[in-house]
Amino acid sequence: MSSVRPWRDIARRQCRQIMVGSVPIGGDAPIAVQTMTNTLTSDADATIAQIRRCEDAGADIVRVSCPDVESTVALKEIVRAAQVPIVADIHFHYKRALEAADAGAACLRINPGNIGSSDRVAEVVRAAKANGCAIRIGVNAGSLEKDLLEKYGEPCPEALVESALDHIKLLQDHDFHEYKVAVKASDVFLAVSAYMGLAEAVDCPLHLGITEAGGLIGGTVKSSIGMGNLLWAGIGDTIRVSLSAEPEEEVRVGFEMLKALGLRTRGVRVVSCPSCARQGFDVIRTVEALENRLSHIKTPMSLSVLGCVVNGPGEARETDIGITGGGNGKHMVYLSGVTDHHVQSEDMLDHIVALVEKKAAEIEAAGMAEAAE
């Protein structure tokens, strides 16, 4: 089969690039995965511990709320401890933005129109420039400006885009251009339409999200439909999956979304069947155990776990490692798409984990050798 598969290509929207700390956003940079802490930011130890779990899950950027002075005071310690750039979430008080910039935040999430006069916006811009901060303009259907609601009668795509353009102008009037923009809504159709309109109107990076999406299952479905549509259309430079779940779960779902579209390749991509009466082993429990035990693997690779020989051999041909259920507790293992050996049920889980870890080490070693040449 030809390796050229044009039906899988996604043409990314062209936009200018900004930096959030050490992470490039936009241009030809990989789509960044973000999340947000839910600890009290003033509790630096708890916040750092949560950030560490998000880093382990692969987060590129983490956002923290800064609603009060105690939070911006703690932010300095948090930034120093974090291994990824930290975004400070600011809502109404411009002084929190100034304090967060001085504390080392890589980005300020703020709506310039919400913080008061042009002089206050100018102060925030000066602080951002002085500290090398980017700014994320965060428009949300749930908190649109009163005049836009009166003009349009309700939150609609045109209102979200107009709000974003108004906020952008406030920054541009102060000669600030290191910004990215989000136009989020909990309604999938509203969010997608707003992002599509905004993508045509601006050349800056876009931060994607379906806000207040729901719990782990419902929120994942809504986010995947909305953000998946946009990403498939080439729109989006950084994402946050908003779930009523632990922040590290948001990161995992974000990477799974990007992996499914071929836009990021971090960790093990598992191909598995839903199981049926033909299964030669408990596929559901096996996949649950494998996903848990292989969550530490960062090296991109693929693993197929199929309960029987109906689709098992075909899927195994397309993955780095595969296992297909057989009779009498004896299952076939495939390496690089080729039948290699059998394994018994009682040894299967440990055996597959060992094979994946070995393969990951081989891929990493080959990459290091290539880089050294």
Image (cartoon, grey):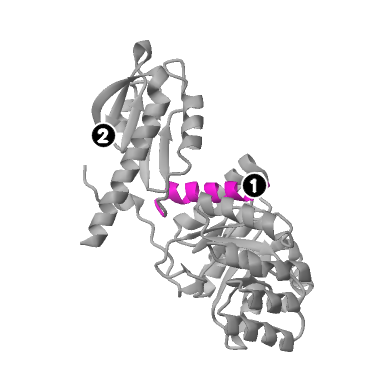
Asked whether 247 falls inside the magenta stretch, the response is: yes
Q: Which label's residue is closer to the chain start, 1 or 2?
A: 1
* Callout 1 secondary element: loop
* Callout 2 secondary element: loop
Q: Quadrant of the C terminus?
A: bottom left
Crowding at dot 1, Cα within 10 Å, few <14 / some 14-19 / many 20+, comes out as: some
Would you say residue 158 is visible in this rendering? Answer: no
**Which residue shows up at 52% across the image and 50% down it?**
56
Q: Position of residue 84 (x, y in %)?
A: 53, 63
237 relative to 256, above or below: below
Out of 279 and 77, give the one closest to the viewer. 77
Q: Position of residue 349 (x, y in %)?
A: 42, 26
Q: Identify the main secondary structure in magenta.
A: helix
Tag of residue 337: 2
In magenta, the rendered stretch is: 243-263
Q: Position of residue 314 (x, y in %)?
A: 30, 30
Task: Left or right? Give the position of 243 relative to 30.
Answer: right
Asked whether 67 falls inside the magenta stretch, the response is: no
Q: Quadrant of residue 351?
A: top left
Would you say residue 211 is visible in this rendering? Answer: yes
Q: Which residue in the protein does label 1 denote?
A: 246
